[in-house]
Structures are given as C-alpha cells and as structure tokens.
Image: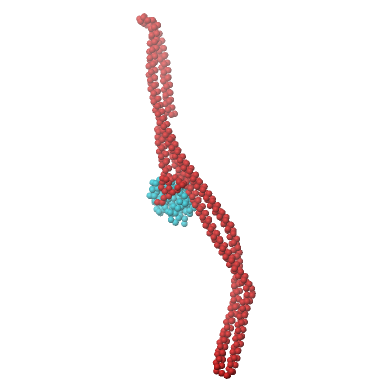
Chain colours: A red, B cyan
Amino acid sequence: MTVLTEQRRKLAEASLQQARTLRRNMAVSTVLGSLLLSLLVYHAHAWTERLSQWLGISEAAILAIMVAIVLLGTNFLAGLVFFRTNYRNAGSLSRTLEALDDELAKAETQLEASRDSMHATVDMDQAFQDCLRQNLRDSETSTLGIIERTGRLNEAAGKLLDYLHHSSANAATMAVDIQQGVEDMNRIASFVRELPDKIRQDAEVIHHILREVKQLEGLAASIKEISQQTNLLALNAAIEAARAGDSGRGFAVVATEVRALANRASAAADTIESGLNQALGAVEGSLANSNLGDSRHHLENATQVVDAVQALQHSYEDMRQFYKTLFSVVTRHNTELAEQIADMLGLMQYQDVEGQRLSRMTDTLAERCRLYAGVEQSPTGFAHLPEALRQLLTHYLENESRHSHPDHQNQTTTADAGPRIELF
Amino acid sequence: MPKTILVVDDSVTMVMSLKTSLQIAGFTVETAHDGQQAMDKLKSGVKPDLIITDINMPRMGGIDFIRNARALPGMRFTPILALTTESQQAKRDEAKKLGATGWLLKPVSGADLVKVIKQVLPGA
C-alpha cells in the first residue's frame, strides 16, 4: 500500500468518524431534549399555573416558552458538543490533508526525479545504441573483409589449380620425352655392353699390326747395314779406280761384289714389301671381316647416342626449368595464400574488440539494474537516481574512450590515443 | 630452430587467431589465458623468445604480468609486446616503465604483427 493510499484512507476514515460522531451527538441530544422536556412537562404542571398567574400570561404560553427554552438549551448543548467534536475532527482532517500535501509534494519530487532518471536512461541508451551501431559496423566491415579475403583465397587457389592442371599436361609431354630418352639410354646401355668386345677385337688387330711392324724394324736394320757396306765398297771402288788407271780387273771384282749386294738389297726390299703387304693384308683382312661395317654401325650408333644424350639433356633442362617455374609459382601462390589467411586471422581480432565493448556495456547495464533495484529500498526513492545514472553514464563513456576503436580506413593512429603500433 | 612465442590473452578468439597466424609465419606458439597462467608456464621452464600479452585480463592483468615476468631469472631482456584495446596513455607509460618492448592496439593485421616481431626479434 502506497503512502498516498494510506493518507487517502485516513482522510476517508476521519470524515466517516466525523459523520458518525455527529449522528451520535444528534441522537443523544434529541433523546436528552425529549427526556428533559417530558420531565419538565410532567413535574412542572403545578408551578406553571402559579407562574401563569404571577406573570399574568396564559399557562399555554408559559409552557410554550418553557419548551422553547428547553429546546434552545438542548440545541445549544448539542451544538457545543458538535462544535467541539467537529473542531477536533477538523484538526485531524487538516493534519491528514497536510500529510497528504506532503506526500503529494514528495510524489511530485519523485516524479520529477523519475523523469530525470528516464532522461538519463535515454542518454545512456543512446550511448549504448551508438556502441551497438559501432559494433554492427565493425562486424559488418570485418565480415566483408573476411568474405573479400576468402574470395581472394579462392581466386588464388583456382589460379594455382589451373596452373597445376597446365603443369600436369606439360609433365605428360615431358614423360613421353623422358620415355624416349629412356629407350635411347637402353640403346646406349646395349652399345656400351657390346663396346668392350669390339674394343678387344680392335686391340688384337692392332697388336697384330704392331708385331708385323716390329718385324719390319729388323729388315730396316739389314737394309741400313747393306747400304753402309755398299757405300764402303763404292768408296773402295773409287779408290781402286783411281789407283789402277788402266787396270780394269779390280773394277770387275768390285762390280761383282756390288751386284751381290744389290741382289741382297733387292731381296731385303722384297722381304720388306712382303711384310708390309702382310701387315696391310692383316688390316684389310680385319676391315674385311666386317669390322669396317661394324665401325660404321658403331659410328651411326655413336651419332645416335650423341643425339639421344643431347635429347636427354634438353629433356633434363626442360624438366629443371619446369620444376623451377612450378616451385616459383607454387611458392608465390602459397605466400599469397598465407598473407590472405594471416589478414583473415587479423580480422578475427575485431571479435575480441567488439566482445570487450559489449562486456563494458553489459557491466554498465548490470550496474544500472542495481541502481533501479536500490530505489525500492532507499528512503529517498528516486531522488538520487538521476545523479547516480549520470555518473554511471560518465564513467561508461570515459571507460569507453580509454579503449581503442578500430578504424578500418586508417590503421596507423587513433583519434585520441597514441600510435597503433609503438616500439619503446 | 623456430623461435617460440608466448601468447597471453583471456579471449579464446584472440589466442587462436594469433596462434594460427604465428604458426603460419613459422613460429612455435605457447598460450596462456591470463597473467597468472603465463607466470606458471614461465616458472615451469617454458623459455619463450618473445611474449605477446593482453593488458586487461582476469586474475593477473598484463601490467602486473610484465612486472612479475621481468623479475624472473633470464627474462630481463626477453621482448614483451602488449597487444590490447587499452589506449590510455598512463597505462602505456606504465608498461614502458616496467620494461615492455612495444605497445600494439588491437586489431593488428598479420603482416604488421610479423613485421613488428621481426623488428624486435632478430633472426626471426
């Protein structure tokens, strides 16, 4: 029950009490007057006659005057009692009305305070709305940023996939080339396996030729010796010819010896020619035994081997360049992907910023609820609530200003704080 | 040998975001959800090459954590970066006085964070 209701109840009870007192006094005075009048009429009939004679007026007039006096007295007494009762009730009623006025004044003060509280609450709610709008904008911006970076991630991943598909086709082409190279290499291996036998056969032929040539070395020595002796004999013949003059017999001896030497030289020359022919025959025989054909075949094989090796080298160069480019592209794309992911993760930090902002708001709301709840227990009611709400709002705004506000357009500084990144 | 970074923040989102960013950048990451838990890790033998800490945290805040961490043996010259929404100059000055290496306001992009780390952690 409110104070005003209580006062109103007291006022109604006082009015009712006054009516009851008035009714009781009226009833009592009526009964007393009637009783007194009856007693006067009953006991005064003897002396009303004497009084009538003494005053010279009729007995009826005396009786009327007496009734009038009794009624007047009775009414006076009743009025006096009524006045006193009414005076007391009026005082009570006045006090009740004064209390009611006080309560009304208090109620008006409370109403004014509650009106101020409402204004303070509206201001606070306005600040909360600003904060919520800011949160909404930040959430929207960070979400759009994440979406944008997700798109870039998808684009980068798509490019990488396309490149890998293209690379796969190139790799297939290279695989064919490499297979060809492998076949060439197998041919090379086969050639290399046969090569020692061929070399051994060639070496045997060469050794045979060497042996023949060594034989020619002895023949050459014989020819040299014969030549020296021929020279000596020729010198002797010249001396003898000078000495004999006309004697021609010595010349015949010398001529015979020279002839014999010439014969030996001719035989030696024949032997040399034969040896050379044998050596030539051995080489020709070796070549004739399809060695020459094999050599041509080997030469062709060797040419093919060189071509195959060159082809393999080209394939290797292509493959090296291919993997170098592939590594470069994959590295570049991976770096781009890592940067995009890092930026996306950076955007996630807005959740913490917004979470802290909402936490400060909920703390303020909880404090406001506590202030509202305290009004009921406070003897002053709403009186101190507006000031408390204003202080709470001021504290909230000051606390809010002490925290960074993400600036999506300018990441370097905040409006009212130091640089966003500062190294001491 | 990858460098180890201790991340201290009461926000699970922040811890996961930073941990993933730093791991992508090639760092080993240890985490703690308040200053007290970070102190327990340091005392248990975790030796980070760098610490990134929030300022406003339950149990033990970032300012007290910087003060206590600097008092531990071998932690005198370990770089400590404050990563926070707190923009009060007094707090920034106090952190600087206690030996913080830098002050970063949230949010910080992954590229900026790695750039700052490479500035204060040579060879990272």
Report x, y in % for residue A98: 39, 25
Residue nearest the observer in this picture, A311 or A125: A311
Whether residue A416 appears in this view of the structure is yes
Q: Nearer the viewer, residue B78 or A150?
A: A150
Front residue of this view, candidates A246 and B64: A246
Q: In this view, does A273 lie to the left or right of B51?
A: right
Q: In which quarter of the image is residue A287?
A: bottom right
Q: Is residue A259 left or right of residue B5?
A: right
Q: Report whether A372 appears left or right of A268.
A: left
- In the rendering, at what x and y percent does residue A333 appear? 52, 54
Q: Residue A160 vs residue A92: left or right?
A: right
Residue drawn at x 40%, y 15% is: A29
Residue projecting furthest to the bottom? A246
Residue at 56% x, 61% y is A318
Instruction: State the residue lying farthest toward the left.
Output: A54
Residue B16 seen from this side? no
Tell me the quarter of the image containing the N terminus of chain A: top left
Residue A120: percent from left, percent from top: 42, 36
Q: Is residue A203 depicted above or below A352 in this figure? A: below
Question: Where in the figure is residue B52, as x and y percent of width and height?
Answer: 44, 50
Figure disc tally: 0
Of all residues, the one furthest to the right in this rendering is: A289
Q: Residue furthest front?
A: A246
